[in-house]
Amino acid sequence: MKFIKPFLTVLLSLAFFGCTKNEPIVFKDSSGEKYRPEYHFTPITGWMNDPNGLIYLDGEYHLFYQFYPDSTVWGPMHWGHAISKDLLHWENLPIALAPDSLGYIFSGSAVLDSENSSGLGTIANPPLVAIFTYHDMVAERSGSLEYQSQAIAYSMDKGRTWTKYAGNPVLPNQGIKDFRDPKVRRVTNTDGTQQWVMTLAVLDRIQFYSSPNLIDWTFESEFGLGIGAHGGVWECPDLLPFTSPDGSQKWVLLVSINPGGPQKGSATQYFIGEFKDGVFTADDQMIRWMDYGPDNYAGVTWSNLPIDQDQTVLIGWMSNWLYAQDVPTETWRSATTIPRSLSLFEVNGTLLLKTSPVKEMESLRSKSYSISSSESALPSQSSEIIADVSENFAIQLSNDLGEQVLISKENGLVSVDRSRAGSGNFHPDFAASFSAPMSWEAEKVRVFLDASSIELFVNDGELTITALLFPSKPWNKVSILSGATDLEIFALEK
Ligand code: FRU
């Protein structure tokens, strides 16, 4: 059955395209693939959540992800695997890591151990090392708190196959129930020496561990008490160096939290500060959110990107634990966000994180339309809309059934309203409007639409709102209700 279905899908979609060729847009097919995105990554079938082990090597971006191939709801976690040369076209590869007697394979990261500090490869052929959490369901069911531990696996063939380290776990549990999602990077200490640093989510805190070899880990410090949002458990952290606009070095600590996000359920907060010799110190007490939409969670960044690229690139899981397992896709569940390039910017004396679409997104633009009237047809269900906006603006997307999405800024609040945007009755919190405070001026918006999502970037990512959408028919009209000019629309094609 698994193999017959894609075949039927293709046949049905050919038939569907054939009989509707005069219509401007159609869903890709009518056989359960209705909401399948055109240019966002989705698993072929089954369940996906967090991106894992993001690493670039020899021209390939690796995307591993939390994957349960046998169902469209969460279950025994594997690391699924895909690779891409451009962050847009993904080739699916076999499952990289599967559960074993130590447990399910939860989220984590991957590094190139170029000096072979682990001894798992050679200097001439250094190993890729994945650092992940084992979640032992048997221990959890028995009532023990010690069911999460950190482990490693290595690959000597560019990530194609992985060997779990015989001495796992490398960081055993210490009686703490939430103890997971290791993100590892190489860090230089103030005395010039280097070490591996693991950033780990522990209950509603972050712990830092250091290691000379990715195998022996020493506790360094803890961050999070009395600072930031604490409405839920902290998960999937990332620790990133940036040059701030004034030229100084800053560190950003990304922390996903579930629940307790600004729109209910899951979201990602971040802290800006210093990281010195294993200790993170935040510059201030402010709570900052990376994305004000409901559907960007567990985002982490690629390791080992080429230095000359000077980019920090993140991808998130485009869903929310509130309703991720209920959304109306049939054969698969969940997509990633578009990849985003991270940087710091300053506004009114405050440093904030900017998350812009990566420049590769521009290569998807196929046809462009410059619109002068206030209403225009949308050429494709996969499109990018760009507009100059004034301080208050409102842009509406709609379809033939009168379903609509409103993007606006009014009284210092940027909003995406999906309360009348189609299917939403699968969860009481889905059909809603999502707002974000923006005390500075909005000048430009970029909107990415795909079959089941909207990603809004104000001023190229100074503020973002990411939201899933399940319209009954594709969006085919864009209307400027107020405050927007120089509208440009691109049909996006892979
Ligand atoms: C975040 C998360 C992680 C965990 C994984 C399990 O979405 O809960 O903390 O490792 O999902 O699938």
Image (tube, rainbow, N blue to C red):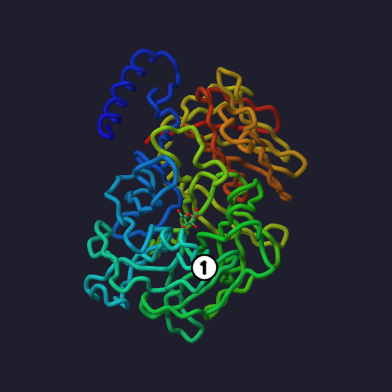
Asked if residue 383 can be seen in this view, the reply is no
Is 116 placed left or right of 436 in the picture?
left
Q: Quadrant of the C terminus?
A: top left
Q: Quadrant of the N terminus?
A: top left
Is 29 placed left or right of 369 in the picture?
left
Is 212 placed left or right of 469 in the picture?
left
Q: Which residue is mark 1?
A: 241
Q: Residue at x 40, y 63 (%)?
A: 134
Q: Residue at x 43, y 78 (%)?
A: 217
Residue 357, percent from left and from top:
50, 47
Q: Quadrant of residue 493?
A: top left
- Vertical placement of 41 versus 149: above or below? above
Nearest the eye: 266 or 395: 266
Crowding near the residue tagged with mark 1, few <14, some 14–19, many ≥20 C-alpha atoms within 10 Å: some
Residue 138, percent from left and from top:
41, 60
Nearest the eye: 354 or 47: 47
